[in-house]
Image: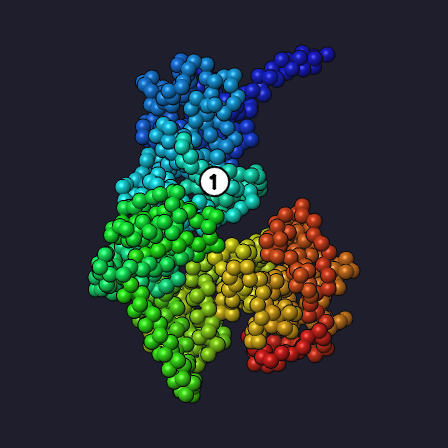
Amino acid sequence: MEIFPSIFLYILLFPLLSEFCSASDTLSSNETITYGKTLVSSGQSFELGIFSPSDSARKWYIGIWYKKFPEIIVWVANRENPLGNSSGVLTISSDGDLVLLNDTTGFIVWSSNSSKSEPGTVAQLLESGNLVLRRKYDNTQNYVWQSFDFPSDTLLPGMKMGWNLSTGVNRYLTSWKDDDDPSPGDITCGLDNIGMPQFVVRKGSEKILRKGPWNGIQFGGSARWSNPFYKTMLVYNNEELYYMGNLVDNSISIRNTVNRSGLLQRYLLKKGESSWTVIDSSQNNQCNQYGLCGANSICKIKNRPVCECLYGFVPKSQSQWDVLDWSSGCVRRIPLRCQQDPIKFLKLGGVQLPDLLQFSLNKSTSLKECRAECLKSCSCIAYANSDIREGGSGCFMWIGDLIDIREFSEEKQQFIYIRMAAAELNNNKKTRLVLILVVSLVCGMLILGFLIFCLIKKRKMKRASDDNVKDIELPMFDLTTVTNATKNFSLTNMIGEGGFGIVYKGTLPTGQEVAVKRLSKNSGQGLQEFRSEVILIAKLQHRNLVRLLGCCLEGDERMLIYEYMPNKSLDHFIFDEHRKTLITWKKRFEIVMGISRGLLYLHQDSRLRIIHRDLKTSNILLDSNLNPKIADFGLARSFGGDQTESKTKRVVGTHGYMSPEYVVDGKFSVKSDVFSFGVLLLEILSGRKNRTFQHPDHHHNLLGHAWLLWKEGRALELVDGICEPLFVESEVLRCIQVGLLCVQKLLEDRPAMASIVVMLSNEGVALPQPKEPGFFIERSCAETDRSTSEEICLTQNMVTISVLEAR
């Protein structure tokens, strides 16, 4: 009977215990927030409390952060007046303001200072991350005060960036002063309201980046980022001018930040993931730097060098341009004499319009009327529509120099008409005629000199390769440094060899160990591989791709310098009877996941869609912690835009890893790499090579053997004797099933890498049953390791094509 008093007491205390154990999202007038006590939004997304950003804990702040990522601070209240210790108190004052008090002195450190404040208000942390002050019984959005009106360095969905034109309040982002100092830095990011809005980042008063002006659809020079879950808008009327993004679905989170170096970045977090991904960056190319090329010039990111004068203009200081200093800009080749010379206009399309420094704007004028107005004024240098919607309307006229023009191609093009002396454009027509004649003459000479051209082709290819390498701005190593690092290319430092040449281990003067890939002077294929590797992977950054540190180009020497992988390649372990025992099941699975994420980056998340075409165990390198890194991009090809497939007559790769459609028809795509990944996955599980696999009961290769075991329900027999405590049968079976799905004969049956990563990492995902693999029924010609020059033993479902090159 003694149990009943206990139950009765629990029932009485349960409401109090519940309130104590669960964090609230609301602060009432009689409550306080002190160190260790927080507000948490209703959906557990955001948290507010007292924090210190540095290890010294000398400065303390009230801030808002992500509940699951407390290191990511999205808003700070008392940025300019930190607490000296953690004894601050956040409460609501008697007149209804939100205040932060120094508990030691009782002084007010920070206050919301709302002009609308009145007694009886409460503070609430909303699920959007907005801290609002509202009347106690008013649940509308008629807030007394809100943190979204006072951004720090982060723009969240639903937060406005821009102007309240009625009150003159300007909402803009300000960087932190330092990584551990949230006080306002000297970088600001916001909207300029001068005629038409412009998106501007400044360092102090100096512009360092500009997007705009707004053309009715988007900010000029800004790519339209399309995401079905995130919509952006610009509102511009008599009362407000602001930019804002809104989430349509809660399956993702997005934040925009500006840091103390002026870098703008957009981060995305998918539901269930544990890390944020950078999906957009303002400094993604050199031309984003404000006014890089000076006055009356244009920045073209695809050119080398990137700056050139507008047509009809020449460098003001040729000597400065020769050393790539473009700050002096350009001046007219033929000066304008306004009313004395005939005037014409040069039409320039696909560009970001010049900055609005000296200009006039008439929103109701047509383009034809704009041209007429520009002709009337001797000070008018150029004109353009201010709004490109519905055929264009409005009139911009620029006076003085044209600053910060850059090439930018979008579906909706922006055109600018630049004033020219008629003689300049007439000369242009004559130049074109002369150019046509010259080109015709040159073509004739090329035909007559075809034999000479063939003789010097190899030298031209090498020079073109060097130019491409230099254009990518890779660090260059001199030959002396590389020679000393490899002990004069000693054979004792040799760690690998291929069709391109030899790979050496080296140690730089800094002590850093590197791998030096030296191109063979007699290897035509090696020259092409060298060029492909440099162009494709110089700017790729992923933890599962081997990192290219630089190159050496001196005389006939062509060398690539990579980060050194102390554990060599994957085949060094899994095909060796003794070393394979060093790789536990957990580590094998981590290697599989690392390779799959690296491939996903190449296929989907890199700047270009890249097809590796030679994925195999020897091209998976292992670092000191046995983390995998995909290497050897000599045969890789890149796809642009919406391209998904290509065809070649020059089939190159490694037998046993190439997909059927590639070997038979020369067609390669991301699904070709998926096939290779499937072969690699089954090799990792079995510890056997696909091509050299032999079985006493049949003549199938490893793929056929795995397929037979799967159909008979004996798939675990494929596994290479893993009997450790961490061995998970369901995980292994899932890997075998994914491997068989990847090597299916028809490419449309194979999953994409994005699906493969989900299949491997999520036990809850239902997998389809695999169909028959490609290239698994082998002839009974016992296949052994052969040199790359020997003919392969072809499978039943294979035909030959014009050229077949094995590696």
Looking at the image, the residue that sits furthest to the right is 712
Type of amino acid under label 1? Met
Count of marks overlaid on the render = 1
Q: Write the residue at 51% across / 38% down.
A: 246
Q: Tell me if I can see residue 263 in this picture.
A: no
List x then y, in percent, for residue 423. Answer: 27, 66
On-image quarter of the N terminus: top right
How crowded pointer 1 is (Cα within 10 Å; few <14, some 14-19, many 20+) is rated as few
Q: Secondary structure at mark 1?
A: strand
Above or below — where is 45 with respect to 211?
A: above
Q: Write the residue at 34% across / 41% down.
A: 195
Q: Tell me if I can see residue 447 in this picture.
A: yes
Q: Quadrant of residue 116?
A: top left
Above or below — where is 481 with respect to 75?
A: below
List x then y, in percent, for residue 364. Answer: 39, 42
Q: Which residue is mark 1?
A: 233
Q: Quadrant of residue 531?
A: bottom left
Q: Quadrant of residue 115?
A: top left
Q: Write the residue at 37% across / 82% down.
A: 441
In depth, the one of 611 and 21 nearer the eye is 611
In depth, the one of 435 and 23 nearer the eye is 435
